[in-house]
Image (cartoon, helix red, strand yellow):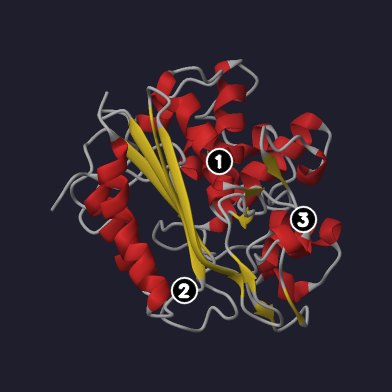
Amino acid sequence: MTNLAPLFDRAFEPLAAAVAARCIPGGVLGIVDSDGQRITRAIGAAQLVPNARPMREETWFDLASLTKVIFTTPRILALAQDGAIDLDAALISVLPDLRQYDASAWERKVTFRQCLGHQTPFPAVEPIYTYGRDPDLLRAFILQREWRARDPVYSDINFILLGFALERLSGKTIRDMEPGPGFAWSTKPDVAAATEDCTWRHRVLSGEVHDDNCAALQGAGHAGLFGTAASVLDFAQVLLTGASECSTALMRQPLSATRTHGWERPYDGWSGDALCSPGTIGHTGFTGTGLWIDFDRGKAWTLLTNRIHPTRHFDSGIVALRQAVGDLINGVR
């Protein structure tokens, strides 16, 4: 068994330096291997304004887009595994009202697999929350909108629609679904890492979802999950050991040069750094979160930060920080 402690100490240094330089308020780094060896460490502040609170190893984080891979992807793949859906079938097999007034609309041809791999023409971002606060009306708006087709990019719309499919098949809203062991859809403000001083909700967010569209939809498939470093590492360890009820084969199967089903895979300049093995998958979240799982080397790591507190309009250096941590996790220097 490899001793993770020296490797972890090196990998923690860039996080400590980012906090010392006031690039981010605080963070938690955690690593686990397939033998169950685990280390986590916290540094900095969970909140700066209006009151300061220290970061702790057990601090809860708004995981943002890690929701896509921890919650939505496993559930979609499990439904496919059970024969409840066909990944190569169009979404209208579950969402028949998608662009229902135009039988020839391109949106009606989009498949589950294309959404998982971000291979659709949906836009990268869309301020859905600016169209109203009624979640049912916003769902109808998303389903009926004539989206302008573009070259495929990473798009939240893909996973918002996958979330709608989960809702239709279960008869429950996302927030009424069980989020998974160690996870939640919200948490108490005093145990959470604060995110942004929101300009339209007029308060510092802590323990409630930061993502604007997810908040307006009152739960969605692309964001909204909360968890701790321990719960994220628990999830990763289950995948590493093969104990997951959902096969990891599709999570690791390439769909493009940068994507698998739900996850990213190593490519030049990706968040996990160039030294990751080819058997690594990973994903990041806008709030400053990330998870990487290296199946070839039997280890996973998570870097959870509150890099958008108290504002997103600041260069936190999160991209370089993630890569520096990944570089050292993989044994360099």
Question: In the picture, residue 78 is in which quadrant?
Answer: top right
**Is 54 positioned to the left or the right of 216 in the image?**
left
The reply, left or right, for residue 89 in relation to residue 180 is left
Q: Residue at x 55, y 36 (%)?
A: 73
Question: Height in image: 24 above or below 84?
Answer: below
Element type at mark 3: helix
Q: CA distance from mark 2 to mark 1?
A: 21 Å
What's the residue type where badge 1 is placed? Ala
Find disc 2 in the rendering and name its residue.
Answer: 24
How far across and how far down the image is residue 263, in percent?
42, 42
Q: Which residue is mark 3?
A: 139
Category of crowding for the residue at label 3, using alpha-carbon neighbours closer than 10 angstroms: few (below 14), some (14–19), many (at least 20): some
Comes first in the chain, label 2 or label 3: 2
Q: Can residue 191 be seen from the camera position used here?
A: yes
Q: Position of residue 92 (x, y in %)?
A: 66, 38
Which residue is rendered at x = 37% and y = 80% of the image?
21
Given this view, does label 3 or label 1 mark the residue nearer the observer? 1
Category of crowding for the residue at label 1, using alpha-carbon neighbours closer than 10 angstroms: few (below 14), some (14–19), many (at least 20)? many
Location of mark 1 (residue):
230
**On screen, 239 above or below 159?**
above
